[in-house]
Amino acid sequence: MSTWTALLIAGGLAFVLKFLGYVVPASWLDGERTTRITSALPIALLAALVGVQTLTSSSGAITLDSRAAAVGVAIVALLLRAPFIVVVILGAAVAAGLRLLGLP
Amino acid sequence: MSPAGPVGSTALTPERRSQVVRQALSVAVATGTYGISFGALSVAAGLSILQTQVLSLLLFSGGSQFAFVGVIAAGASGGPAAIATSTLLGVRNGLYGLQVSRMLDVRGLRKALAAHLTIDESTAVGVAQPETAGARLGFWVTGLGVFVLWNATTLVGAVVGDAMGDPRQYGLDAAAAAAFCALLWPRLKSKDAVAIAVLAAVIAVLVAPHAPAGVPVLVAACTALLAGVWRRAHHDPPPPHRWPDQGHAGPAGTAGAAGAAGAAP
C-alpha cells in the first residue's frame, strides 16, 4: 500500500466517523460501558505510541537511547505545566544534545 | 455564510459575542503553534510536504495525524496499521458529533462542513458556552480558526523540517515521543486512566519485537476494553456528548468536559 493510498483512506475514514456523529441517533452510543471504552481508547493508543516511539528501534527491537532521556525531560516539563510546543522542543533538544555528545 | 449560523431569537449581546470570539481565537492560535511540530515531524517520518499538507486538510485531527505519521515512519509496510490507529483515535470525534449536531442544528453542506470541523477544540469551546447562540458561535469560530491556522503552520513546519536534513541529528524522533506524551497528558485525570496508559505502553513495547510495525499499538489498544469491564466506576469525565436538547447546561456542568477536551488537538 502506498503512502498516498493510506493517507487518503485515513482521511476518508476520519470524515466518515465525524459525519456519523451527525447522522446516527445518540441512543446508539449512549451506554455507560460504551462511554467508558471510548474515553479509554485514546489513552491506550497514545500511551502505546509513547512506549513504542521511546523504547523500540525501527526494527521493533527494545532499545534504550537518547529518546528515553528526552521523554523523561518532557514528562518533567508537563508536570511543570509547560505548553505543548515547549514540551516538543525540549524533547528534541535533549536528544539532539545527547547525540552531539556521542550517545546513541 | 455567517459563521454563527442561525441564532434564533436569542441573539448574543456584543459583549458576549466578542468574549466568545476572543476565547475561540485564543484556542485556535494555541493549537496552530503545534501545527509546526506536526509539519516538521511528518516530513521527518518520510512524508512529502504535499502529503503532510493533505493530511492536515483532509484528516484534520491532530492526534490521528501524529499517530498516522508515527506508525508510517516505523516501516514501509505500516499503511494498514497507520490507517487503523488514526481511525481508532478519530472515534472520539464521532462522539463529539453526537453532541455538537444537537447544538448546531445544521443541514446539507453546512452539516458536512461542521462534521469536518468537529474536533477536541471546537467541541470544547462550543459546549463551554452557557447559551445556544454562544455555543454555535464558539464552535464555528474555533473550528474555522483552528483549520486555517493548523494548515498554515503545518506548511511552515513541513518546509522547515524538509530543509533540516537528518531528523535524528535534531532529535526529531524524540520530539515525536514527547508530542505523544503531551497529547496523552491531559487525559490522565484518574488512577484508572494512568493504569490503562501504563498497561498499554508496556504491552506495546513487549509486543514490538514480535510483530510488524504498527501492530503493537493496535494490540495495546485492547486495554481500553478493560475500562468497559472494570467493576469500579472510573473517575474520568465522560466525553462531552450530553448536550441537553432543551435549556442550557450550566458552566459547572460543562467545565469537566471542556477541560478534558481542551488541551489536545
Image (cartoon, helix red, strand yellow):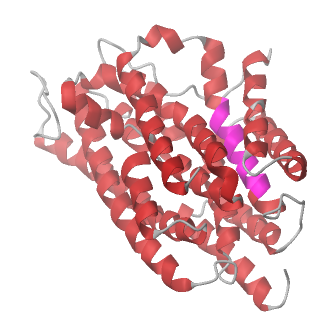
Give whichever of B166, A98 is nearer the camera.
B166
Taking depth in this image into account, of B247 and B7 the one nearest to the observer is B7
Determine if residue B69 is in view: yes
Looking at this view, name the residue that lies furthest to the bottom: A101
Residue B188 visible: no
Which stretch appears magenta?
A40-52
Image side of residue A12 versus residue B67, left or right:
left
Residue furthest top as drawn: A27
Front one among B102 and B15 = B102
Q: Tell me residue B246's x, y (percent).
A: 29, 11
Image check: B43 left or right of B97? right
Q: Residue at x 47, y 33 (%)?
A: B93
Name the quadrant of the N terminus of chain B. Answer: top left
Q: Is residue A5 left or right of residue B19?
A: right
Q: Residue at x 47, y 35 (%)?
A: A13
In the rendered image, residue B95, in percent from the top left (x then y), is placed at 48, 26
- The quadrant in which residue B99 appears is top left
State left or right for residue B19 relative to residue A45: left
